Image (tube, rainbow, N blue to C red):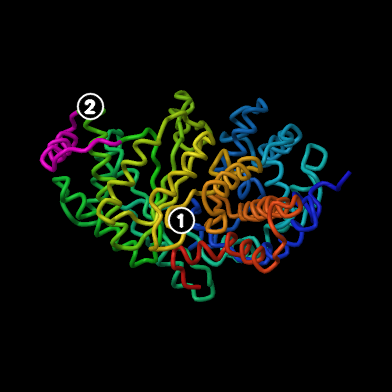
Amino acid sequence: MRKFMDSDFLLKNDVSKKLYEYAEKMPIFDYHCHLNPKEIAENKSYENITQIWLYGDHYKWRAMRSNGVDEKYITGDATDYEKFLAFAETMEYAYGNPLFHWSHLELKRFFGIEEVLNRKTAKSIWDKANELLKTSEFTAKRLIERSNVKALCTTDDPADTLEFHQEILKDETFKVRVLPTFRPDKAIYLEKDDYLIWLEKLETVSNEKIDSFKKLVEVLEKRVKFFVENGCVVTDHSLEAPFYRRDTENRIEIIFAKRLAGETLTKEEADTYKTEIFLALGKIYYKNDLGMQLHMGALRNNNERMFKKLGADVGFDSIADNNYGEVLSKLLNSLEVNGELPKTILYCLNPKDNELLGTMIGNFQNSDIPGKIQFGSGWWFNDQKDGMIRQMTALSQLGLLRRFVGMLTDSRSFLSYTRHEYFRRILCNLVGTWVEDGEVPYDEEILKAMIEEICFVNAKNYFKLEI
């Protein structure tokens, strides 16, 4: 019986262990996360482990709800210690859940705590962690530096002023590049209740009146250029339900005018608008050499009662069962037909779509850049061991795994960088097992390069990041 999460955790053979020696030394480029740039600019610190561990972490909240924990001890008014105890108890029921591994990696790597978290150890771990949190090693900037992060990309609305990114840049002692990501979901989903409110914010920040679809596209292009001036290298879209419907410029203007007037649009009208704004943005990204991320397959805010009580992004989302193949092909092809398809990373939340994306990327590759169209890493409910293996296996069988741009955290927590370690161990074991089974030759030079490229080099080159 092996020791729990020892130095060879997830590494099942000698080749895997050798490959991980290369992987663990590589720096991190976290090209998609949800860290708050304000917290980085202010170099936030934390009073206790609940604040840094449980605040805003809907992964942990979902597990606690599944364990029957009252909402008071999750997002409610219980004390931080009471919330921590509720999570510690939940860990006793979380064997097999990636949270169990993630949480203990975080305790080990950041706090040096080797104890297993449960009801018996909760008080000891609480005291040890909180004592360490008083030190300068646990501020936002220091946690990023300790994780060997060279650059990270936050997620930002087109109407964002990027003032905190600019503030971070002024700190010459902080060498990590914190770059904005252009996330125009609020520009696309015009049927949502807050669309007109958001449009007013965009008008305010751009100091321009948006009274037509054409003007909206012009303003968004200016915002993209502003983001690029502030270091942006990548954009991000959430594609929930599939859409693709083309129409004339005149018809698009009529649809936009109806929405400005507060009228309700038909699904066909909304899909027409979404298609045209998406394609307009794709062309802008291509002109500015930006990567485009497409996250597909989330079914959001399923629990209406809790949505009304707590809002979005609090742990009541799940995997959708949509069919994206045909519309995704049409969206990408509509940009490619005139050579205006930007670098694109495709993510699926439903693992049934792994092979769909694994084959879709091959339709639009060219010599602009190796691996121009990417099948993104296991996302959200798939960023666990089996999900990562399934994604990388599909990619290797249908494309080129060595061109893969690798892992990202997609997280709001400054402790989540251990997920890169988790991914790297799984990657090394996958490739090492191929070698041990005689499916791949043991060419150490090629294998070393492959691991280093997937862990860091490919992403750095893909986004032309100068570090």
> Overall secondary structure of the magenta stretch?
helix
User: What amino acid does circle 1 point to?
Assistant: Thr
Q: What is the C-alpha distance between the residues marked 1 and 2?
A: 34 Å
Q: Quadrant of the N terminus?
A: top right
- 399 or 260: which is nearer to us? 399
Question: Residue 242, how many percent across, how many down?
Answer: 36, 34
Residue 24 appears at what percent x and percent y? 69, 62
Residue nearest the observer in this picture, 277 or 101: 277
Magenta-tinted stretch: 244-263
Viewer-side label of 1, 2: 2
Residue 194 seen: yes
- Label 2, on which residue? 266
Image coordinates for residue 415, horizontal then vertical, percent: 62, 53
**In the picture shown, does residue 323 fall above or below 200?**
above
Within 10 angstroms of label 2, few (less than 14), some, or many (20 or more) residues? few
Choose top left, top right, bottom left or bottom right for residue 145.
bottom right
Q: Is residue 17 magenta?
A: no
Name the outermost residue toward the right: 1
Q: Is residue 370 left or right of residue 44?
A: left
Q: Nearer the viewer, residue 66 or 447?
A: 447
Residue at figure coordinates x 27%, y 40% from the top left: 275
Q: Is residue 285 above or below residue 380?
A: below
Check if mark 1's residue and mark 2's residue have beta carbons within 8 Å.
no
Residue 245 belongs to the span the image colors magenta: yes
**Which residue is tagged 1?**
154
Residue 315 location in percent, x, y?
A: 53, 34
